């Protein structure tokens, strides 16, 4: 027999799904600056910006011109939606389920950022190897502004005070991020399997 809270959780989960789609649309619309969307755009900003602005103010995930706070906001909604979906199906939430959702959500955030920075590193490395960056164009400058603070943190332990050229630093950087992503995925499976054995 279905508990009273299950239909409420089902409706709330559906509303969160709808709100996440609205946020996705809002984010995509910001990619096309200068396009006038009219009243639809004003309506979207009025219902999404208060939520997104809270994450812009309270999460330190802005790197140069790139603002990742909407990603954190969407992941927070996804976390809440997973819990509501579980309540809608079972009428309850176990400690093991909460731990599974928390660990999976944390890994989603970490792996997202690592993947973005790996892609930026690979683009920069490809530009160097192909000789496309000889003019020092604006595109490469922007990528380096985003990439270099993270690159220095990742590469420093491997260099131990020795000097290396930028290409070799990028190779080390990309190798480390790739190893963390692959190793992290295996570690995540192991941790989730352990959590799945918790009986409560």
Image (cartoon, rainbow, N blue to C red):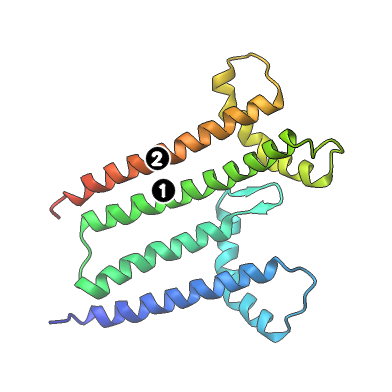
Left or right: 61 as drawn, with respect to 20 = right
Please tell me whether residue 25 is drawn above or below residue 76 in the rendered image.
below
Mark 1 and 2 residues: CB-CB less than 8 Å, in contact?
yes
Mark 2 surroundings within 10 Å by alpha-carbon count, few (fewer than 14), some (14 through 19), many (20 or more): some
Q: Nearer the viewer, residue 52 or 108?
A: 108
Please tell me whether residue 133 is drawn above or below residue 199 in the rendered image.
above
Q: Position of residue 68 (x, y in %)?
A: 59, 54
Q: Give the residue displayed 40% in from the left and 40% down from the top.
A: 184
Nearest-to-viewer mark from 1 and 2: 2
Q: Earlier in the sequence, mark 1 or mark 2?
A: 1
Left or right: 146 as drawn, with respect to 90 = right
The quadrant the N terminus occupies is: bottom left
Mark 1 surroundings within 10 Å by alpha-carbon count, few (fewer than 14), some (14 through 19), many (20 or more): some
Q: How many marks?
A: 2
Q: Nearer the viewer, residue 28 or 137?
A: 137
Q: Secondary structure at mark 2?
A: helix
Q: Give the residue displayed 55% in from the left and 75% down from the top.
A: 22
Q: Quadrant of residue 137?
A: top right
Q: Position of residue 73 (x, y in %)?
A: 51, 61
Please tell me whether residue 137 is drawn above or below residue 86 in the rendered image.
above
Cα distance between the residues tagged 1 and 2 = 8 Å
Q: Position of residue 116 (x, y in %)?
A: 58, 48
Q: Position of residue 14 (x, y in %)?
A: 39, 78
Q: Give the residue displayed 42% in from the left and 64% down from the top.
A: 78
Which of the numbered marks, if any, corresponds to residue 107?
1
Q: Can you name the residue that lies furthest to the front here? A: 130
Q: Can you name the residue that lies furthest to the right here? A: 135
Q: Secondary structure at mark 1?
A: helix
Which of the numbered marks, if any, corresponds to residue 184?
2
């Amino acid at each position: 027999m279905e508990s009273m809270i299950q239909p409420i959780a089902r409706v709330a989960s559906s509303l969160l799904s709808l709100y996440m789609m609205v946020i996705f649309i809002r984010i995509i619309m910001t990619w096309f600056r200068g396009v006038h969307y009219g009243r639809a755009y004003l309506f979207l900003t009025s219902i999404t910006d208060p939520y997104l602005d809270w994450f812009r103010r309270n999460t330190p995930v802005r790197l140069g011109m790139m603002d990742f706070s909407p990603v954190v906001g969407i992941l927070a909604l996804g976390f809440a939606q997973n819990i509501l979906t579980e309540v809608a199906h079972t009428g309850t939430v176990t400690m093991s389920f909460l731990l599974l959702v928390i660990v999976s959500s944390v890994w989603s955030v970490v792996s997202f950022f690592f993947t973005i920075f790996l892609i930026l590193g690979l683009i920069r490395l490809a530009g160097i190897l192909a000789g496309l960056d000889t003019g020092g164009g604006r595109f490469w400058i922007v990528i380096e502004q985003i990439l270099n603070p993270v690159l220095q943190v990742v590469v420093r332990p491997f260099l131990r005070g020795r000097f290396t050229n930028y290409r070799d630093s990028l190779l080390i950087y990309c190798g480390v991020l790739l190893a963390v992503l692959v190793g992290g995925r295996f570690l995540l499976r192991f941790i989730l399997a352990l959590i799945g054995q918790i009986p409560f």
